[in-house]
Amino acid sequence: MGQGYKILESGDIYVLKAELDRLVPETMPVFVDGLHWLVSVGDDGRRYLSIFNNEGNERSSDKGDTVNHDYDKRVTVTLKDGELSVLKSAIGKMELERIDDKTYRVTIPTADFAIFNF
């Protein structure tokens, strides 16, 4: 990155991506591969993980919403500590598959989101 500047030069975008790819799994208490996700902490200290699947949902004034379930996504959630449990799913029941002490798999349907405790 340019010395003394707060500007990311176009040639440095790959350096930034590599650094983020390293930092996010290293510093976050959880990591999700393949979808958009967010971690938050409640006033009581409980941690929440939200996972969103915005793929495969098209909206038009002619047809309204069209959901293509070919875009349902199976993701792996890796925790540094704790256990994962489903708190809320927007559309239907969410099934967690526990792989080991820190790893889970879950399918997030197209146009759905889920909130987990961990």
Image (cartoon, rainbow, N blue to C red):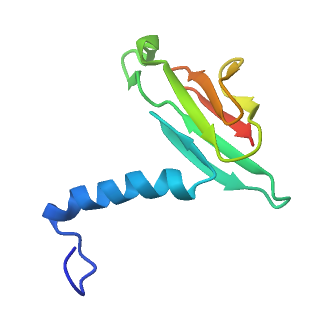
- Snapshot quadrant of residue 68: top left
Up-down relation of residue 49 to residue 94 (above or below): below
**Residue 43 rendering spot, x and y as whole percentages:** 82, 61
Instruction: Looking at the picture, tell me which residue is in the foreground, 78 or 38.
Output: 78
Please indicate whether residue 116 sits to the left or right of residue 60 in the image: right
- Identity of the residue drawn at 70% across and 18% down: 95
Tell me the quarter of the image containing the N terminus.
bottom left
Up-down relation of residue 5 to residue 68 (above or below): below
Tell me the quarter of the image containing the C terminus.
top right
**Residue 103 rendering spot, x and y as whole percentages:** 63, 32
**Residue 25 rendering spot, x and y as whole percentages:** 51, 50
- Identity of the residue drawn at 60% across and 38% down: 78
The residue most toward the bottom is: 4
The residue most toward the front is: 100
Please indicate whether residue 66 sits to the left or right of residue 29 in the image: left
- Identity of the residue drawn at 71% across and 37% down: 116
Q: How many marks?
A: 0
The residue most toward the right is: 44
**Residue 22 rendering spot, x and y as whole percentages:** 41, 54
Instruction: Looking at the picture, tell me which residue is in the foreground, 33 or 41.
Output: 33
Please indicate whether residue 21 sits to the left or right of residue 81 in the image: left
- Snapshot quadrant of residue 15: bottom left
- Identity of the residue drawn at 65% across and 21% down: 91
Up-down relation of residue 39 to residue 35 (above or below): below
